[in-house]
């Protein structure tokens, strides 16, 4: 049957839905911060193409659910937005808490760090899917402990944890180092990603790589 041949359409930023007929698209909304004009545009597109729903996801994206395949290209054209990296072996949308920009409990500027990470790495191809979180205080609202790389804010910098994972086999990250500035945080991120690119096996998450070679060996390779 024709519907059995349908699958995700990553080149169109579209994910096949449960009905095996319709698709969902996820515009890129870094940190889930969306100005009113973008909210209106997403609503207009959902209404124009008779979407089933607009779903706010745990990755801080808004997904337009239930589009027909023939409407996907026009929906993206009307949105005028880039797709969020919702599928594939790549860096997914960075999860970012409000930080000192908005939250009364925050002690570090996780929003600026998270946006810089998103700008530098979002959508980058890697051996497996790769998630990051930037939290502005130890309350860890961006779930940094269960990300491949997580940042946890303190008054004088960020604790850096690695190898975390949620999903079917939850794994709490391991503390790697401390980044005293945003520049330090960006540098250690690049060092981790470079090491992962060079040593990770296909579809091997960072935590699995660390488990395979040992944390000591990983630390030596990353903290040069």
Image (cartoon, rainbow, N blue to C red):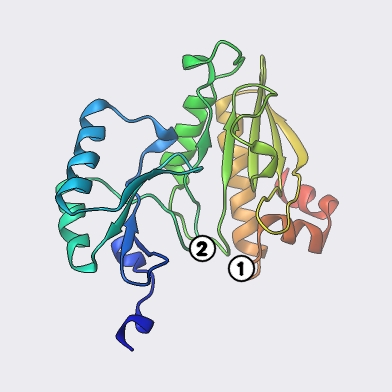
Q: How far apart are the two marked residues, 2 and 1, measured between alpha carbons?
A: 7 Å
- The circle on residue 50 is none
Label 1 belongs to which residue?
A: 203
- Using residue 40 as the reference point, say whether residue 28 is left or right of it: right
Which residue is located at x 36 percent, y 83 percent?
5
* Lower sequence index among marks 2 and 1: 2
- Using residue 197 as the reference point, say whether residue 76 is left or right of it: left
What is the x, y in percent for residue 57? 46, 44
Which residue is located at x 50 percent, y 41 percent?
94
- Rendered-image quadrant of the C terminus: top right
- Rendered-image quadrant of the N terminus: bottom left
Q: Quadrant of residue 182?
A: top right
In the depicted structure, whether residue 181 falls above or below residue 43: above
What is the x, y in percent for residue 122? 44, 48
As helix, strand or loop, the secondary structure at mark 2 comes to loop
What is the x, y in percent for residue 83? 32, 51
Front in this rendered view, residue 39 or 122: 39
Any part of residue 224 in sight: no
- Mark 1: give few (<14), some (14-19) or many (20+) Cα within 10 Å: few
Label 2 belongs to which residue?
A: 89
Which residue is located at x 64 percent, y 43 percent?
149
Front in this rendered view, residue 4 or 164: 4
Which residue is located at x 65 percent, y 21 percent?
137
In the depicted structure, whether residue 68 falls above or below residue 109: below
Front in this rendered view, residue 70 or 83: 70
Any part of residue 21 in sight: yes
- Mark 2: give few (<14), some (14-19) or many (20+) Cα within 10 Å: some
């Amino acid at each position: 049957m024709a519907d059995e041949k349908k699958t995700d359409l990553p080149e169109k930023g579209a994910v096949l839905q449960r009905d095996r007929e319709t698709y969902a698209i996820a515009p890129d909304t870094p940190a889930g911060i969306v100005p009113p004009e973008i909210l209106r545009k997403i609503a207009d597109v959902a209404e124009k193409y008779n979407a089933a729903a607009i779903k706010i996801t745990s990755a801080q994206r808004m997904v337009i659910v239930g589009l027909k395949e023939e409407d996907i290209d026009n929906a993206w054209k009307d949105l005028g937005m880039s797709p969020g990296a919702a599928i594939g072996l790549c860096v997914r949308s960075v999860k970012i808490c409000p930080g000192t920009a908005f939250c009364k409990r925050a002690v570090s500027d996780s929003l600026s760090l998270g946006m810089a990470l998103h700008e530098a790495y979002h959508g980058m191809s890697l051996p497996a899917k790769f998630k990051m979180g930037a939290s502005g205080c130890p309350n860890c609202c961006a779930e940094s402990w269960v990300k491949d790389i997580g940042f946890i804010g303190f008054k004088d910098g960020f604790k850096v944890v690695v190898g975390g994972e949620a999903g079917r086999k939850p794994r709490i990250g391991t503390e790697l180092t401390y980044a005293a500035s945003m520049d330090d945080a960006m540098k250690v991120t690049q060092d981790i990603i470079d090491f992962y690119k060079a040593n990770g096996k296909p579809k091997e998450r960072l935590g699995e790589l660390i488990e395979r070679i040992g944390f000591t060996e990983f630390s030596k390779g990353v903290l040069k």
